[in-house]
Image (cartoon, rainbow, N blue to C red):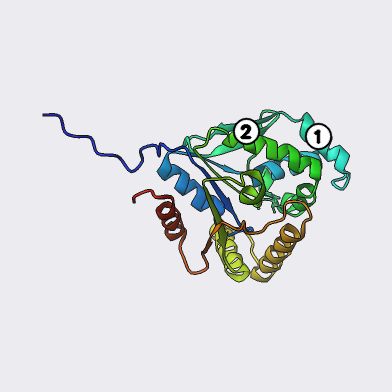
């Protein structure tokens, strides 16, 4: 007799939901988002990559980032593509055929991205791309305004938080592990400055959607956060 097939935990979660994750820098949205997407058989995209990739290209072209028209025109001119990485889960951003790799993580790009992220034309354009990516569902999307603006009707909205001190400690540990120079006080100050930039921005600032599920990860591991999310989504672990 054929053995009755049991549902595998990794089987595609058939409802094809849209899951939004917002929160401040360094809170673990990508780690958690990827792990949730993997369990559900969904795709995952980090929308920060789009803002960073554009900032990188604008800097490469020597544009004045304050020149909103010039940066917007560049964003329109670029050929944007989103292709799954080898794991089949993470969607990677490509501009003009080039993958947004480690170069978009440089300090220079990190500091400059908030100027580009405040550009209304750029936000409109990237929001359109993000909505297109989520059109068919089956996606976990992380950013700053996914629940409040991009997908206000997302099936699940999470707001991931952690104290700035804890986020700085995590980043410090990460840099040390990579053998890179790290100064905890400077990292802490930079994280607080980025929080303010993102929260005070006029257009689509970082804030909790009214109906977001807030998870404070200060005392939790990323694995525990992912498990909490999966439980709320109704995916049996
Ligand atoms: O997520 P990450 O920190 O890499 O994003 C880089 C920057 O892009 C953020 O600091 C923020 O200014 C901007 N961003 C945004 N809206 C998003 C995602 C990122 O404004 N949805």
Left or right: 104 in relation to 174: right
The quadrant the N terminus occupies is top left
Q: Are marks 1 and 2 in contact (CB under 8 Å)?
A: no
Q: How far apart, in angstroms, are the residues tagged by discs 1 and 2? A: 20 Å
Which residue is at the front of the view, 19 or 217? 19
Which residue is at the front of the view, 231 or 45? 231
Q: Is mark 1 within 8 Å of ligand 1?
A: no
The 10 Å Cα crowd at callout 2, few under 14, some 14 to 19, many 20 or more, is few
Q: Position of residue 211 (x, y in %)?
A: 57, 56
Q: Is residue 56 above or below residue 136?
A: below
Q: Position of residue 221 (x, y in %)?
A: 45, 62
Label tally = 2
Kindly identify which numbered label has been placed on residue 142: none
Q: Is residue 60 above or below residue 213?
A: above
Of the residues tagged 1 and 2, which is closer to the observer? 2
The answer to whether any part of residue 63 appears in the image is no
Q: Position of residue 180 (x, y in %)?
A: 61, 58
Give the mark, 1 or 2, whose residue is nearer the N terminus: 1
Residue at the location (68% across, 57% down)? 206
Corner quadrant of residue 27: bottom right
Kindly give the residue lying farthest to the left in the view shown. 1
Circle 1 SS class: helix
Residue at the location (67% across, 65% down)? 187
Residue at the location (41% across, 56% down)? 227
The answer to whether any part of residue 3 appears in the image is yes
Q: Which residue is mark 2?
A: 132
Left or right: 124 in relation to 8: right
Q: Is residue 114 above or below residue 136?
A: below
Q: Which residue is mark 1?
A: 74
The 10 Å Cα crowd at callout 1, few under 14, some 14 to 19, many 20 or more, is some
């Amino acid at each position: 007799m054929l053995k009755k097939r049991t549902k595998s935990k990794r089987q595609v979660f058939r409802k094809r939901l849209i899951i939004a994750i917002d929160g401040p820098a360094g809170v673990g949205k990508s780690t958690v988002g990827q792990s949730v997407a993997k369990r559900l058989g969904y795709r995952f995209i980090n929308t920060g990559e789009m803002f960073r990739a554009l900032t990188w290209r604008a800097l490469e072209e020597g544009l004045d980032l304050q020149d909103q028209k010039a940066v917007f025109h560049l964003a329109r001119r670029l050929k944007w593509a989103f292709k799954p990485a080898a794991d089949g889960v993470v969607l990677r951003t490509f501009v003009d055929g080039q993958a947004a790799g480690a170069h978009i993580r440089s300090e220079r790009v990190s500091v400059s991205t908030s100027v580009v992220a405040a550009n209304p034309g750029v936000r409109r354009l990237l929001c359109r791309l993000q909505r297109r990516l989520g059109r068919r569902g089956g996606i976990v999307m992380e950013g700053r305004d996914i629940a409040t603006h991009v997908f206000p009707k997302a099936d699940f909205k999470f707001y991931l938080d952690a104290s700035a001190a804890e986020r700085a400690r995590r980043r410090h540990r990460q840099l040390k592990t990579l053998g890179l120079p790290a100064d905890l006080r400077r990292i802490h100050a930079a994280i607080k400055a980025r929080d303010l930039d993102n929260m005070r921005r006029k257009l689509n600032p970082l804030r909790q959607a009214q109906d977001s599920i807030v998870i404070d990860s200060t005392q939790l591991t990323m694995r525990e956060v992912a498990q909490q999310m999966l439980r709320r989504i109704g995916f049996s672990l």
